[in-house]
Image: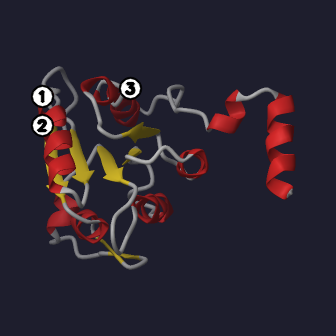
Amino acid sequence: MNGLGAETQFHVLAVDDSIIDRKLIERLLKTSSYQVTAVESGVKALEFLGLVGDEEFSNSNSKCQSVEVNLIITDYSMPAITGYDLLRKIKKSTSLRDIPVVIMSSENVPSRINSCLEHGAEEFFLKPVRQSDVNKLRPHLMRGQKNVPNLNKRKPVEECLSPDRIRAKLNHDLE
């Protein structure tokens, strides 16, 4: 699966503590011909990726080192390690930081969305995730394969506002 070509199947790690949401995202990804590994927690995701705490496994015999993950999609609200915590750990890892990460949540909280995007998330999907959301993943996967600059990354909400609206929001936050 390491070769590039028309038959390349991308491997997505899906992380969600809700079995219903995990099965839904797994089905949507498989419908789009992705290979999917689904885990139920941020801790399990870190183990699968070869990260424990702030340290990376150096054991080359670890199954984590032999599995290539092309994209990680994770729920935001999970016990122990949130999707945001998982994002931060992945982006701090020298071996994993280039893997695109997508956050999903049932809560539409602009400050949370912005924080995730500013700390390296490629996208932020609102649940329930739909096929149209999954279709937005391919450019991020292709970029990872071809080392193409990231032109498709979603901008934080504030960057899309006019300067007057940003100033008003900042002034409002200071009050």
Would you identify the image quadrant in which residue 131 lies?
top left
Is 56 drawn above or below residue 73 in the view shown? below
If you read the primary sequence from the N terminus, does the residue marked by circle 2 or circle 3 appear first?
2
Mark 2 burial class by Cα count in 10 Å: few <14, some 14-19, many 20+? some
Q: Nearer the viewer, mark 1 or mark 3?
A: 1
Q: Amino acid at mark 3?
A: Pro
Q: Position of residue 78 (x, y in %)?
A: 34, 64
**In the rendered view of the protein, which quadrant contains the N terminus?**
top left
Where does label 2 land, which residue?
27
Q: Are marks 2 and 1 in contact (CB under 8 Å)?
A: yes
Q: Say what secondary structure mark 3 lies in.
A: helix
* Kind of residue sitting beneath label 2: Arg
Residue occupying image coordinates x 40% and y 65%: 82
| Residue identified by numbered label 3 | 139
Q: Residue furthest top?
A: 6
The answer to whether residue 1 shows anywhere in this view is no
Q: Which quarter shows the C terminus?
A: bottom right
- Rendering coords of residue 95 (x, y %): 39, 59
- What residue sits right under mark 1 in the picture? 31
The alpha-carbon separation of the residues under discs 2 and 1 comes to 6 Å
